[in-house]
Amino acid sequence: MSEPQDPQSLVHVQIIVGSTRETRNADLVTPWVTHRAAHRDSLAIEVLDLRDWSLPLFAEHRGTVGNPADPTYSDPIVKQWNQKIAAGDAYLFITPEYTHSIPGVLKNAIDNVFASFAFRNKPAAFIGYSSGIGAGTRAVEHLAMIAIEAELVPLRNTVLLPKVQQAFVNGSPVDPDAEVALDILLDDLIWWGTVLKRARAAGEVPPAMARRLAAAQRQR
Ligand SMILES: Cc1cc2nc3c(=O)[nH]c(=O)nc-3n(C[C@H](O)[C@H](O)[C@H](O)COP(=O)(O)O)c2cc1C
């Protein structure tokens, strides 16, 4: 029997499901990913299904944020969303490809993480899928660029699932390479999640905006 893990040492991974439409193929991918991730002793898994988060279309500005140390936001759910994301140590995004990018609902959820720096200095891994042979590649490439701006640490190794409607039988992928790719992705997420959790606890440099403000004040 394995030793129980110290909860403090666990990497809290939030699996963010990026499609919300009825009949979504995300429901083929998410149970497999969640099941495999749950088997990793060093991870604490939480699924954030954007269907459960009716976030408004992004609407924040200085007036809605209020006190940056304890932002109000335009709607209580935006505050809850920022607090939820802040509780994660690492993120696993599951995204289809819509119009060569990610769904608007996923981009909106990322934009709504505003003023809290909740994603900052935490790793992000990506699983892409599509109904064609593109396999979500372009969505994942876009998402990696978006992740940089959110100050996430985007990881190289991905899982890409072409022809997603035919990619699973009884909940398992038809292509054995998908299992290998997911294992590699989870290994990387655990390594980076552990390293960056430790590094954040040891202290972080302030966000660039704060350092720019400090530099401007020194120049006065
Ligand atoms: C609005 C929209 C745009 C799409 N654009 C692309 C695309 O650019 N490339 C691609 O390979 N598949 C594209 N697809 C197909 C989706 O990748 C496929 O339907 C996938 O299953 C969508 O995920 P979901 O069912 O979980 O929402 C698109 C689908 C939709 C609904």
Image: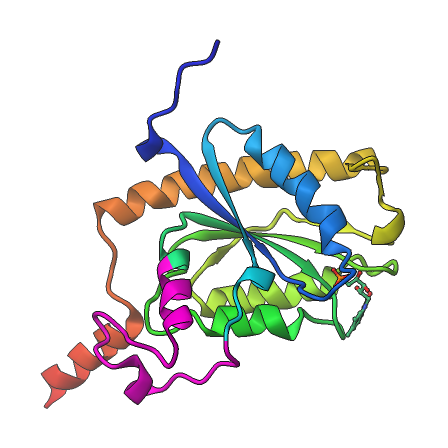
Residue 209, magenta (yes or no): no
Q: Determine whether 172 is above or below 114 in the image.
A: above
Which residue does the image show at 79% across and 60% down from the upper left? Answer: 23
Which residue does the image show at 76% across and 48% down from the upper left? Answer: 28
Q: Nearer the viewer, residue 2 or 202?
A: 2
Of all residues shown, which one is farthest toward the top? 1
- Quadrant location of the C terminus? bottom left
| Residue 7: x %, y % from top left | 34, 31
**Which color mode does the image show?**
rainbow
Q: Determine whether 21 is above or below 57 in the image.
A: above
Using the rendered view, name the quadrant where residue 214 is placed: bottom left
Magenta-drawn segment: 56-83
| Residue 95: x %, y % from top left | 67, 59
| Residue 14: x %, y % from top left | 49, 49
Q: How many marks?
A: 0
User: Left or right of 149: which side holds 38?
Assistant: right
Which residue does the image show at 39% across and 38% down from the upper left? Answer: 194
| Residue 151: x %, y % from top left | 42, 64
Residue 76, magenta (yes or no): yes
Which residue does the image show at 53% across and 70% down from the upper left? Answer: 54
Using the rendered view, name the quadrant where residue 40 is placed: top right
Q: Quadrant of ligand 1?
A: bottom right
User: Left or right of 99: which side holds 104?
Assistant: left
